[in-house]
Image: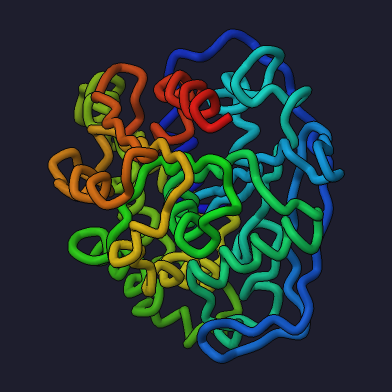
Amino acid sequence: MSLIAAVIALALQGAPQSPPQQQYAPAEADYIARDCQFRSGERLDEVRIHYQTLGRPHRGRGGRIDNAVLLLHGTGGSGRQFLAPQFAGELFGPGQPLDIERYYIIMPDNVGHGRSSKPSDGLRMRFPKYDYDDMVALQHLLLTDGLRVRRARLILGTSMGCMHAFVWGEAHPEFAQALMPLACEPIEIAGLNRMWRQLIIDGIQNDPAWSGGEYAAQPAQGLRTAASILQIAGAAPLYFQAQWPARDAATAEIRARVDRAIAGLDANDMIYQFESSRTYNPWPNLDRITAPTMWINSADDFINPRNFTYPQEALARMGANARFRMVEEAANTRGHGTHTWAVNWQQDLVELLARSE
């Protein structure tokens, strides 16, 4: 499991669980995009995009697939995060909002992540310096060329995937019938959001063991620095205080979390993952987004704090089809990880699907 995904998973440990749910076994495949040109000017002969699907495509009028739902994961994650019970158990079952008997669920691993092409495959720091526009372009190729999807019923993204949803809405305004961005802002990655990301990158690159990316073993101290920062960024203050109210228990817990989070990580992959946000800035072109949109943030999110005025300013430019809700901090919210705890926004999704029919 990647670092930020591990942080979110750990933040959910000890939370009240939903009733036992069906275990989902998605179909898996790879799409190969050929002769890929990146915005940096670099290119690769082939880029592998691994993806998983649940349900079956339905063809409507004209034989076109009309029930595709694209789910986009967060920084360092993969499509598998959407199989977690707090997400899948609330959404994919019979009669639930994304019932897989009704919808064709597509869960890619973005370039640089999971089982898709990434620096640790061998190119290391010579891998093309992809950004969010490149990632969305490859998602578009997967859907249109690989899966023959010409229009998505819904694009839902969490964290980085939330930002990708805004990019989709501007780059391909007619492609998605509805957008649901969860846990982000449609602004340049600056201020504290850029600062903690830069500290993660610097923490790895300042470890002598990193060796310009040509390390023989993972730079352990650099990864530990990165994991420590992410523990703070992904934490939920009220929940953590309730679960670990004593000093010694809190100390032991956070050290154990960092130890578990860094297992299996690759330092170069992580640098690319956090640096890929460097060009993100949908703010100037928000008026291009025309699809019905339900944007959700949570009040206990360190990364997207509750007192930003951007949501209100953005809605004024996105028009009547766009709505925003701030999930109030509560016992079942998990900071930034609230985006994967679907019980907090399931009804918003139901309403979005209804008004975008």
Farthest top residue in view:
19
Residue 126 is at least partly visible in this image? yes
The residue lying at 27 percent from left, 19 percent from top is 330
Residue 13 is at least partly visible in this image? no
* Rendered position, 1 above or below 13: below
The residue lying at 37 percent from left, 73 percent from top is 278
Pick the quarter of the image with the C terminus.
top right
Task: Tell me: 316 left or right of 39.
Answer: left
Relative image position of residue 243 (x, y in whole percent): 30, 21
Farthest right residue in view:
63
Relative image position of residue 317 (x, y in whole percent): 26, 52
Farthest bottom residue in view:
41
* Rendered position, 324 above or below 3: above
Task: Tell me: 112 left or right of 54.
Answer: left
The residue lying at 48 percent from left, 87 percent from top is 212
Give the total of numbered labels: 0
Q: 9 or 109: which is nearer to us?
A: 109
* Rendered position, 329 above or below 143: above
Q: 162 or 199: which is nearer to us?
A: 162
What colouring does the structure picture have? rainbow
The residue lying at 74 percent from left, 59 percent from top is 144
Relative image position of residue 9 (x, y in whole percent): 49, 36
Q: 137 or 49: which is nearer to us?
A: 137
Relative image position of residue 280 (x, y in whole percent): 38, 68
Task: Tell me: 33 left or right of 183.
Answer: right
Q: Quadrant of residue 335?
A: top left
Task: Tell me: 8 left or right of 68.
Answer: left
